[in-house]
Image (spheres, rainbow, N blue to C red):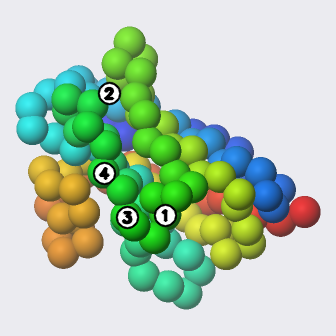
Amino acid sequence: QVQLQESGPGLVNPSQTLSLACTVSGSSIETHYYYWSWIRRPPGKGLEWIGAISYSGSTYYNSVFKSRTSVSRDTSKNQFTLLLNSVTPEDTAVYYCARETLPGDLLRSPADALWGQGTQVTVSS
């Protein structure tokens, strides 16, 4: 059974860098042809796709976040990470990691992706 688990700080100061990790169990993140993605849901808003890293290590980003986002992976830990720089209170959200078959496709069909449980991140001083 494949499972994804997010981890990271629940509270981040404004202007700092948010760092989240997603640990995958039951499947290798190098398995063809999956994409490992980060998504968020701000309070009262819909899902926002942030970026992804593929089974081969290629990265894909939402243009809205690209200038301050980095997605990377550690295959030895079967883990992928999100860095979001220069956070503001508008970055407060529940952050999810997920596995999908095309970058961003889970916005069209959320049920077709495999999701982590999500982690609340609040940006506040």
User: Whole-percent x and y of residue 48?
Assistant: 41, 71
* Identity, as a three-letter code, of the amino acid under mark 4: Tyr
Crowd band around label 4 with a 10 angstrom C-alpha radius: few (<14), some (14–19), many (20+): some
Whole-number angstrom distance, CA of label 3 to CA of label 1: 6 Å
Whole-number angstrom distance, CA of label 3 to CA of label 4: 7 Å
**Callout 2–callout 3 Cβ contact below 8 Å:** no
Q: Mark 3 falls on what kind of element?
A: loop
Location of the C terminus by quadrant is: bottom right
Disc 2 marks which residue?
A: 25
Crowd band around label 2 with a 10 angstrom C-alpha radius: few (<14), some (14–19), many (20+): some
* Identity, as a three-letter code, of the amino acid under mark 1: Phe
- Which is nearer the N-term, disc 1 or disc 4? 4
Which residue is pictured at 30% across the width and 51% down the height? Answer: 60
The part of the image, by quadrant, that contains residue 31 is top left
Crowd band around label 3 with a 10 angstrom C-alpha radius: few (<14), some (14–19), many (20+): some
Disc 4 marks which residue?
A: 60
Mark 2, mark 3: which one is toward the viewer?
3
Residue lying at the far bottom of the rendered structure: 44
User: Whole-percent x and y of residue 51?
Assistant: 37, 54
* Identity, as a three-letter code, of the amino acid under mark 3: Asn
Q: Mark 4 falls on what kind of element?
A: strand
- For the image, the number of numbered tags is 4
Disc 1 marks which residue?
A: 65
Mark 4, mark 2: which one is toward the viewer?
4
The part of the image, by quadrant, that contains residue 76 is top left
Q: Mark 1 falls on what kind of element?
A: loop
Disc 3 marks which residue?
A: 62
Mark 1, mark 2: which one is toward the viewer?
1
Which disc is residue 114 wearing? none
Q: Nearer the viewer, residue 100 or 1?
A: 100
